[in-house]
Image: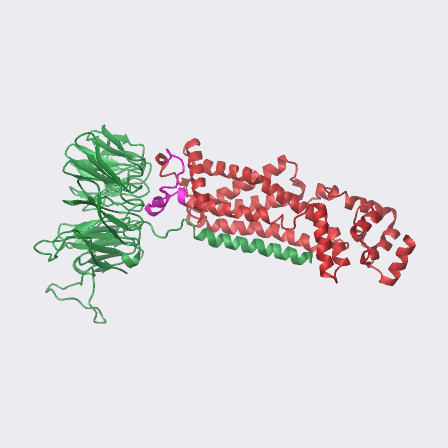
Amino acid sequence: METAKSVMRLRLVLVALVLILVTTACIGQRSGVSWADMTLVGEQQQILVSYNDFMVLIDPTTGQPVPLRNSEGEVRLDDAGEPRQWEFQTEGSQFFTTPLFLEDDEDMLVADYNNRLINVNFPNARLGTGIPTDIPGHVIADIVLEDDTLFVPLMEQNLLAYDFNTREQLWEFETERGIWGTPQVVDGVVYLPSMDHSLYAIDSDSGDLLWELDLEGAVGHQPILDDERLFAGTFNHDIFEISLDGEILSQYEASDWVWGAPVLVDSVLYAADLSGTVYALDADSGLEEIWRNQVAGAGIRPSPLVTDSYVIVADRDGGVYWVERESGEVVLEQEVDAEVLSDILLVEPNDVLSLPDSLVIVSTVNNSRILVAFTLEDGERRWVYER
Amino acid sequence: MWDFIINPFITILALFYSVMGNNIVLAIALLTVVIRLLTSPLMLQQQRSTAAMQEIQPKLKEIQEKYKNDREKLASAQMELYKEHGVNPLGGCLPLLVQFPILISLYGTIIIALASTPFQLIDLSGRFLLPGLDNLVPMENTWIGMDLTLPPTANPTYALVLPLLVMVTAWMQSKLIMPAMPPNSDGTQSQTAQMTRSMTTIMPLMFGMFSLSFSVGLSIYFVVSNVVGIVQYSLMGKADWRRLFGGESKKDEKPVPVAASSTASAASEAKATPAAVKNSLPAKEDSSETSEDNKVKSGKGSSNSAKNRRGSPRPKPRSKSTEKKAKAK
């Protein structure tokens, strides 16, 4: 009897241990690194999506992958006779950044998350002829090319500068934490946001520090440059106006982390934070508040999309909100039923692209709704791209 | 599901991180100490329960022998014995089970708080229960070249030392604090003792294997927790270091009394009157006897256990034993 009890007790403990194993496997274990990145390509404003192990080019009129065509404009077929689509995958690679389109328009340079710079031949959606360059870290912020110098921000820490033609490393600038926002390069100066709470100004030729400004909070986006000043938001709830020589000109306190880059339009700075609040601040009056409105029930990670009439934001619960620019009131609301973390795109009709209406493109973390397109004016859902 | 525990843990970890000069390992260690101190009443209860169970083992055996053909009376007599000695048969398990949510939540805390990718960091937002902690984000997640959010197998090779430390400290702790189990009458280990010994070996191994699969930060928690446990029990005088190296336990010589020193007095009785003890052995098979009667007769309970230790002969048939019992009276 006693033996049986002891065996039972041991079994109970072992079962409990197994339960721990299973339960802990379900905690805090979101798979993946980051969210999708989108950019518009060419006059046809095709949407290039970089997400996890693939890049795909989407036709904004249909929401379907763009077919590959030969030089005569005919659709290419694969071995099975099916139309080939513009999609790029290569073994061991992940993509979370916007590729750099090179001058010849044939190749694009991609910072692979798995420590490489690779050339991709755009017309063929295949690896290009250039030899991949190994880099000593992961990349989740966009690379920048300026005057034949390639700036590569690393997720763990440091900014690298390479000669674009030879891929020789020119210099390395050390930071204490990672760089998750794209550097801003203007007039020979690199303005570098860092997760170590500092905004740096670096000489682009030598890599020497010009100045460092402690913002007391992580900066996760590209600093906004307007004329003679910079704007940046931090995880410490602050939005700053900063002079080009590193002085804080004004400061505004938001409610929560400001992760997406603020947007400056007509001297009004629009920003959103992880409390679901959208802000309109007067950029010419020391960031004086024009209006603020908690429009969303969950946090807003992406930068606001500012159009003529609206400020459009999307939150972590999948809500998409059209906010009137003048008043800050929500005039329209849609649902995508999945978390939105990527920046929002606007596709507008032009002479080449025959779209009846402007489209708002939202990307979610759910593979069944990677892209969702709404019309700008009335929020009507037009198409969904899934994988 | 576990956010109601995880979020407070994250908040406390962030506070400690701030206090400890942004040193994440010290923050985890301090959090571990606090958790350990808060759960020590449970641990003590577990220890007491285990010790009490061990004390009444001989009596339990008597009852099991006595009522082996009558489940109802057996159950009733067992419950009465438990009640009499204030023992909860599940008392050893319950504190252990209560600690599991803490362990699970601590794992979640380390993974979420030490975010190293955008996805991880976005999941940290909104979890601080106190204002003023956002300027700590992102918290340092590396230590001597190891990423604390990754398992040792995904870190430099020297990170494998941590699971080893987890196993060693876990083994040390269980050896030091596990109560001694009395052997059988023939000198061999009882089933219970064997089971306990297995647990002492299996549990450290299992935790070592866990540590290989889970984050380095959790290994640090295990090591600190085990060391704190060893220190705690040492300070309370409950840790027997001689058992660590295979020596005889002090507890073997001086068992902690439950009702009274059953084994000691039984040992002395067995020396004085071996015949009487031998003859009294079959008496336990008499269903009319109660545990109270046994206590009165033998002085303090298990004369049988003393007899068993001396390797005495098997019990005699009932008819003869009844006669001898009558004679002894």
* Magenta-colored stretch includes residue B120: yes
The color chain A is rendered in = green
* Magenta-colored stretch includes residue A72: no
B60 and A199: which is toward the camera: B60
* Vertical relation: A93 (above or below) A227: below
- Is B132 positioned to the left or the right of A352 in the image? right
Residue that appears at 33% across and 42% down: A156
Residue numbers of the magenta segment: B112-133
Residue A135 position within the rendered picture, expressed as x and y whole percent measured from the top left: 29, 46
- Is B49 positioned to the left or the right of B297 in the image? left
A125 and B39: which is toward the camera: B39
Residue A83 position within the rendered picture, expressed as x and y whole percent measured from the top left: 19, 67
B274 and B279: which is toward the camera: B279
Chain ID, red in image: B
- Is B36 positioned to the left or the right of B287 in the image? left
Residue B158 visible, this angle: no
> Picture quarter containing residue B142?
top left
